[in-house]
Amino acid sequence: MSKIKKRGRIIIYAHDVMLITGLSYRTALRILIQVRRQFQKPSGALVTCKEFCSYMHLDENEVVSFLQ
């Protein structure tokens, strides 16, 4: 049997934004709303790590490794 390699998540949540930025939960929610607007996503749509990193000008590899 082959082993299944566990991969990191591709979706980012407000709690993750809090941990990455050190901001409050409410501010993290606002950032996710701004990311959705930037990428013309509907309200309530999920935000990917790639979109978040692009918006915040962060290195995607660092964020993904931080979330694991």
Image (cartoon, helix red, strand yellow):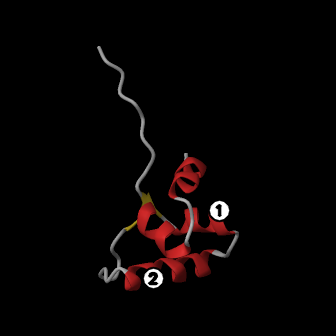
Mark 1 or mark 2, which is nearer the start of the sequence? Answer: 1
Q: How many marks?
A: 2
**Label 1 packing within 10 angstroms: few (<14), some (14-19), many (20+):** some
Left-right relation of 2 to 31: left
| Front one among 63 and 29 | 63
Residue 10, located in which quarter of the rendered image? bottom left
Q: Quadrant of residue 68?
A: top right
Left or right of residue 46, residue 18 in this image = right
Relative image position of residue 66 (x, y in whole percent): 60, 51
Q: Which mark is residue 33?
A: 2
Q: Position of residue 2 (x, y in %)?
A: 31, 18
The amino acid type, in three-letter code, at marker 2 is Ile
Q: Which mark is residue 19?
A: 1
Q: Position of residue 27 (x, y in %)?
A: 61, 81
Query: Could you tell me which residue is drawn at 35 percent across and 79 percent down?
Result: 39
- Relative vertical location of residue 3 with respect to residue 20 in this rendering, above or below: above
1 sits to left or right of 20: left
Please, what is the three-letter code of the amino acid marked with disc 1? Leu
Question: Which quarter of the picture shows residue 18?
Answer: bottom right
